[in-house]
Image (cartoon, rainbow, N blue to C red):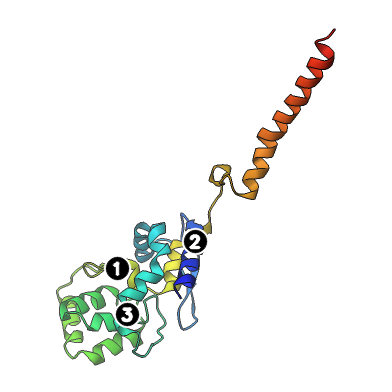
Amino acid sequence: MASNDSKKAESRANYEKASTPAQSYKTPAGKEVKIDPKDKQISYLQGRLDQQKWVNRNDRTTNFYSSYHSRPLVVYNDCYHPYWNYWLLSQSLDTMSMWCYHHRASMDQARLSAMYAQNAGLQARVAALEAQRIPVNQTYVPPNVDPDLAYNDNYVNAAYNPQPKTVTVYEYGPDSNVGHELLWIFVYIPLMMFGVWLVLYLLFIRTY
């Protein structure tokens, strides 16, 4: 298992973040959703996902949701992680209500209804926030939580939009096949040609 995770991380390390997100992503329920490049959630994730966080996302996600892996996996038609509800419901009412208030427009209504059904005071608290006309912040994240952990893999990958790294000759080590080829072309062959010329010069040209 550790070996597979290492291989996955190594494979992901061969990619880098694109300057723009993907054109769409697929929800866990299979719905293809177009991405607005001006989507604040996407741009927020883009700004906070560096290569190391993207490479290590699988480990970070596994650790973050480790307490909920035995619970039923509910599939929703939105961009959030399937276990995110479980984590939210283990937090304070303030944290739950703030999240739902700021993200309810992009949440699957089935997800929101499930949260309301599992916490009697949640819907009333969200309604109270609405009555206060608090500005909606689509990038709201509870304190001390990596923003990408709230989202599912497809959405995060669309935001990161991994592209193969552009490899230059300087990235090749001396033990690589390409490195050996370059050494022959630019070092060994010129030296051999110089050696042949020097021998011919000493034997024939210099004697005259």
Q: Is residue 152 or residue 174 the one in the foreground? A: 174
Compared with residue 19, is residue 143 higher up or lower down, i.e. above or below? below
The residue singled out by tag 1 in the image is: 138
Q: Residues within 10 Å of mark 3 (few under 14, many from 20)?
A: few
Image-based side of 111 in relation to 98, left or right: right
Q: Residues within 10 Å of mark 1 (few under 14, many from 20)?
A: some
Residue in the image at 19% along x and 85% along y: 122
The residue singled out by tag 3 in the image is: 66
For the residue labelled by badge 3, is the local secondary structure a helix, a strand or a loop? helix
Q: CA distance from mark 3 to mark 1?
A: 26 Å
Of pointers 3 and 1, the one earlier in the residue sequence: 3
For this orientation, the residue located farthest to the top is 208
Q: Is residue 196 or residue 108 the one in the foreground? A: 196
Q: Residues within 10 Å of mark 2 (few under 14, many from 20)?
A: many
Kind of residue at disc 3: Ser
Which of the two discs, 3 and 1, sits closer to the camera? Answer: 3
Kind of residue at disc 1: Gln
Contact check, label 1 and label 2, Cβ < 8 Å? no
Kind of residue at disc 2: Pro
Residue in the image at 37% along x and 62% along y: 53
The residue singled out by tag 2 in the image is: 162
Q: CA distance from mark 3 to mark 2?
A: 26 Å
Image-based side of 12 in relation to 180, left or right: left
Of pointers 1 and 2, the one earlier in the residue sequence: 1
Which of the two discs, 3 and 2, sits closer to the camera? Answer: 3
Q: CA distance from mark 1 to mark 2?
A: 24 Å
Q: Is residue 134 or residue 120 the one in the foreground? A: 120
For the residue labelled by badge 1, is the local secondary structure a helix, a strand or a loop? loop
Q: Position of residue 24 (x, y in %)?
A: 49, 69
